[in-house]
Image: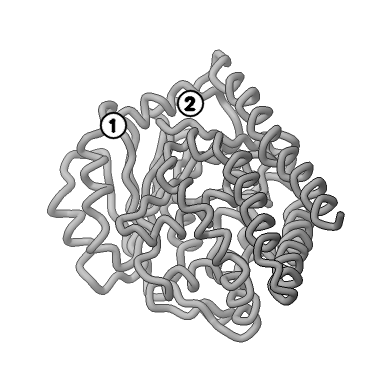
Amino acid sequence: MIVWVYFSIYGGIMAAIVGLGYFLQRKKERSYTSGKQLVSSEELSVIVPFRNEAQRLSQLLDSIRGDKTQLGTYVFVDDHSEDGSMSILRENLSGSNWKAIVLEANEKGKKVAIRRGIQESEGQWILSMDADVSFANDYFSTLSTLEHSDMYILPAVMVAQRWYEHLYEVDLILVNAANCGLAGWKRPIMASGANLLYSREAFERLDHVERHAHMPSGDDIYLLRDFREGGADVRLVTDPKLAIKTETPQSFQEFIHQRLRWLAKTGDVKDNLSTSLAIIQAILTFAFVALLVAKGWSQEWKEFWTIFAIKTGMDMLIFYPYFKRIQRRVSWFFIPIYEFLFPFYTLLILSMMYWFKPQWKGRKLDRNF
């Protein structure tokens, strides 16, 4: 009886938030290209902050060279790289549609780099990208079909190179699918600075970096909060033509560092909707694990695997439309393995979050950053 009550509650919540929310979001998106005022690539500045990206710049440079429009301006901002990243840029880029800036000795961090790049740029639109991404050659022509808005949260897709890295993909895709569903119902709670478009006017009016200067990372989610609290028109897009692609973390250690950074800034934002979703997820996860432990303790292995199979099947069914939309159906097949490992992974993250200081680009992320 308890098992079926759990699945009734779990299935109802997930089907509503992720399943129905996805289709509501797709309906919203169909209206985003119907306006008369469209985003102009000629009025676009692409801000690319980077630090020690010599080994990963090639895919972005290939995408820039393959861009059909060749419009707008790229502004690369070097955050004290020590691996020759700037030399690679200068050797591989030509023309007048890009510039490179090096932060001063007293300037440090991604937030500072982005704002320095915005100060040194022109144009009505700002697009932030990471230095380790790639995009399709029709990316900017598709971008120019969007109507005016204060902010567009564009898709950022991690691509696995080795089989086990699909598990890292699944972890992010499930969160992004929930974010998509919430955007369909109400509003998004997450954004990725690797692919974030906003108007300069809205940024200058709503940006309050001084409120989160104590957190060295998370420019994307804090900027989203500033825009939301300022009543801005914030929209999410799932169009795969507007997706950037980037590598998954290259090791489990890098993966853990990344997730701990994300968890720290998400908690610091204090978004009630995000917090409520996290509490619901925690309760449902605890209940699921408790059911499995109870069946395992009493050696009811048939019921144990039945519970596991039902939950996995429900998740695969509910999340499939989003995996298909972002063209990551291969990773969808890794959901059963992820489901089995998720309780252990969650316990590890929770045990580390209060004492472990994650790193980014060789820097420990603490308040003295």
**93, 268: nearer the viewer:** 268
**At 76% from the left edge and 71% from the top edge, which residue is drawn?**
294
Q: Can residue 112 be seen in this view?
A: yes
Query: Which secondary structure, mark 2?
Result: loop
Q: How many labels does the image show?
A: 2
Q: In this view, does 114 lie to the left or right of 22?
A: left
Q: Is residue 201 above or below residue 266?
A: above
Q: At which x and y percent is residue 357? A: 54, 82
**At 48% from the left edge and 31% from the top edge, which residue is drawn?**
239
Q: Is residue 125 above or below residue 14?
A: above
Badge 2: residue crowd in 10 Å (few <14, some 14–19, many ≥20) = many
Q: In this view, does 115 lie to the left or right of 148?
A: left
Identify which amino acid the numbered label 2 is placed on: Val
Q: Mark 1 points at which residue?
A: 137
Q: Mark 2 points at which residue?
A: 39
**98, 183: nearer the viewer:** 183
